[in-house]
């Protein structure tokens, strides 16, 4: 059994047995890891708090036949500002599910971990009026990274989408103009069309707009 260390972002969790969890993780090497956190559902368990989505931790893992095992973990970031705010939680959940989906087949997406954490950093304190712009920018960037980069003609016709694609999340958050809801819905429709699995968080976010 091989042991390795990785810095990971928790994308999701599912129950396993009476006390364990299966964690879906995105490593800093931009690959998805599926790992069992044994005893994580026991009250007071060390892995209990670290198993929540939006947590970044450094962990030691043991490789398994189908699932790895989380042996040790140390929290690096918990994004409390997102967890405690409904609108930020909804926006961040879209990013986590998209990241899980595009790495689901074992594919690595370069810079995805860093970009997703950069979005979460910005979402934690961004003006509420800019949350939709940040989600739009994230979707555009991920689509471009997996091969759906907007064509030049589209950018020429829609300068706002081109600007969101090019600029950092911090720059998007600091822009005074509020989000254009039609832009977000357009990008959502495109995302759902080109990603095969139904995205629950994206559907819920659409309904909340």
Image (tube, rainbow, N blue to C red):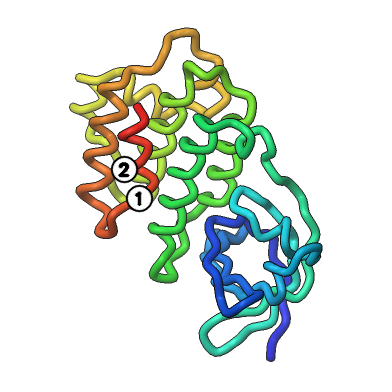
Judged left or right of residue 173, residue 105 is left
Residue 77, disc: none
* Residue at the disc numbered 2: 203
Judged left or right of residue 177, residue 127 is right
Q: Residue at x 55, y 89 (%)?
A: 65
Decide if residue 3 is in sight here. yes
Please report contact status of discs 1 and 2: CB closer than 8 Å, yes or no: yes
Which x, y percent locates residue 13?
55, 63
Which x, y percent locates residue 72?
79, 71
* Residue at the disc numbered 1: 200
Nearer-the-camera pick, 69 or 147? 69
Which x, y percent locates residue 48?
72, 62
Height in image: 204 above or below 152?
A: below
Nearer-the-camera pick, 15 or 171? 15
**Label 1 crowd (10 A; few <14 / some 14-19 / many >=20):** few
Height in image: 135 above or below 42?
A: above
**Label 2 crowd (10 A; few <14 / some 14-19 / many >=20):** few
Height in image: 61 above or below 23?
A: below
Q: Quadrant of residue 40?
A: bottom right
Nearer-the-camera pick, 198 or 142? 198
Q: Secondary structure at mark 2?
A: helix
Which x, y percent locates residue 83?
62, 39
Q: Residue at x 58, y 22 (%)?
A: 126
Q: Secondary structure at mark 1?
A: helix
Q: Quadrant of residue 17?
A: bottom right
Q: Residue at x 43, y 9 (%)?
A: 177
- Tell me the quadrant of the picture where the C terminus can be found: top left
Judged left or right of residue 71, residue 53 is left
Q: Residue at x 53, y 37 (%)?
A: 89
């Amino acid at each position: 059994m091989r042991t390795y260390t990785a810095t990971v972002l928790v994308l999701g969790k599912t129950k396993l047995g009476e006390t364990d969890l299966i964690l879906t993780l995105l490593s800093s090497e931009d690959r998805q890891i599926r790992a069992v956190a044994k005893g994580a559902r026991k009250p007071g368990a060390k892995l209990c708090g670290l198993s929540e989505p939006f947590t970044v931790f450094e962990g030691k893992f043991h490789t398994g036949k189908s699932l790895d095992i989380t042996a040790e973990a140390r929290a690096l970031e918990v994004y409390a500002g997102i967890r405690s705010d409904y609108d930020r939680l909804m926006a961040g959940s879209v990013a986590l599910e998209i990241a899980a989906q595009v790495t689901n087949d074992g594919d690595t997406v370069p810079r995805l971990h860093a970009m997703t954490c950069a979005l979460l950093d910005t979402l934690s304190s961004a003006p509420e009026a800019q949350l939709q712009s940040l989600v739009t920018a994230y979707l555009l960037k991920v689509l471009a990274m997996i091969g759906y980069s907007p064509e030049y003609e589209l950018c020429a016709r829609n300068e706002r989408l081109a600007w969101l694609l090019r600029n950092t999340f911090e720059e998007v958050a600091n822009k005074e103009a509020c989000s254009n809801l039609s832009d977000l819905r357009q990008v959502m429709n495109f995302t759902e069309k080109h990603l095969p699995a139904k995205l629950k968080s994206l559907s819920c976010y659409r309904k909340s707009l």
